[in-house]
Image (tube, rainbow, N blue to C red):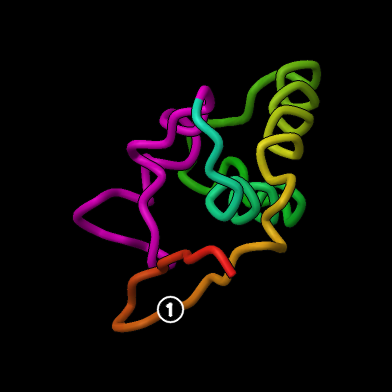
Amino acid sequence: MVKQYCAVCHTDAAMNGGLSPRHYDAAKRDPPLAAVILSKLNAGAMGAAGNGVPDKASQEAWFASTKEQAAGAEEWFVSREEGVVSARHR
């Protein structure tokens, strides 16, 4: 879902918002990136590319799994330097 609904605009080349979830792998924990994605889902950013949105059940499952992935994100420091978002463990 990240590739279909997020990485359409947030590409490696464009780096919109300073990030690219193009290589996001839900099977690997990446709390800082998951927290950013979760904040966008909470803000209603899904569908901004005009690709529509998944059905309600899929949205809820995506939200729940991303919330789980984001656990521990407060232990990370996220910074924007030179237009690039980077994360470091505190």
Residue range corresponding to the magenta coloring? 1-27
Image point (29%, 49%), residue name: 11
Q: Amino acid at mark 1?
A: Arg
Single out the residue that lies furthest toward the front. Answer: 90
**Residue at the extreme left of the image, as rendered:** 13
Q: Is 36 contained in the magenta span?
A: no
Estimate how packed mark 1 is, as few (under 14), some (14 to 19) or many (20 or more) residues with alpha carbons within 10 Å: few
58 vs 26: above or below: above
Q: Residue at x 75, y 39 (%)?
A: 67
Q: Position of residue 57 (x, y in %)?
A: 80, 16
For mark 1, give the secondary structure. strand
Residue 20 painted magenta: yes
Circle 1 residue: 80
Please provide percent x and percent y for residue 16.
37, 63
Decide if residue 13 is on the left or right side of residue 61: left
- In the picture, measured across the screen, residue 22 lies left or right of residue 67, that is left
